Amino acid sequence: MEVLYKRYYGYLFAITFRYVRHQEDAEELVNESFVRVYANIGKFIGRGAGEEFENLFKGWLSKICVNVSIDFLRARKMRLSLDDMDIED
């Protein structure tokens, strides 16, 4: 797990930062992405070898990372919308 984290942290951080544009949020979301990766690593179906396998794995990682980022943005949008409402609403 440590090897995966060290190898792909920068790659996933770059993806996440494009979505959230805030360093602390991006760092937290990358860590959340790795939690999901570790929990679902058995579901990854990688065929091929070498570079082909690497590309498939990076694609799978990036999909998880994008989904985590989008979930975060949706939750933040919902929270901001509720904060904008009056008590009467």
Image (spheres, rainbow, N blue to C red):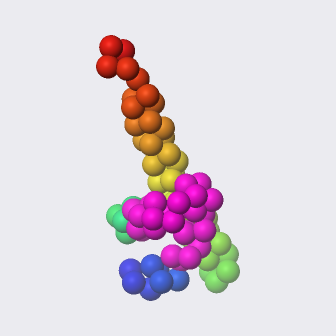
Q: Residue shown at 67%/75% (left/top)?
A: 52
Q: Residue furthest top?
A: 88
Q: Is 32 covered by the magenta stretch?
A: yes
Q: Nearer the viewer, residue 52 or 58?
A: 58
Is residue 54 toward the left or the right of residue 69 in the image? right
Query: Can residue 35 be spotted in the picture?
Result: yes
- Write the start and end of the magenta stretch as one range: 8-34
Residue plotted at (32% across, 19% down): 87
Q: Is residue 24 shown in magenta?
A: yes
**Which quadrant holds the N terminus?**
bottom left
Residue 35 image offset from top left, x and y in percent: 36, 65
Along the horizontal axis of the image, is 59 left or right of 42?
right
Residue 66 visible in this rendered orientation of the protein: no
Q: Quadrant of residue 59?
A: bottom right
Image check: 68 left or right of 87? Answer: right
Q: Position of residue 19 (x, y in %)?
A: 59, 54
Q: Quadrant of residue 41?
A: bottom left
Q: How many marks?
A: 0
Determine whether 53 is above or below 15 in the image. Answer: below
Q: Residue furthest left?
A: 87
The residue sitting at 46% across, 80% down in the picture is 4
Q: Pick the residue in front: 49 or 15.
A: 15
SS majority, magenta: helix
Where is residue 18 shown, x and y percent of the image? 62, 59
In the image, 32 versus 51, the foreground residue is: 32
- Work out which quarter of the rendered image holds the C terminus and state it: top left
Q: Can you give x and y, in whole percent of width and height, for residue 34 in the image?
A: 42, 68
- On screen, residue 66 above or below 58: above
Identify the residue shown where x is 51% and y is 76%. 9
Q: Which residue is more in the foreground, 49 or 8?
A: 8
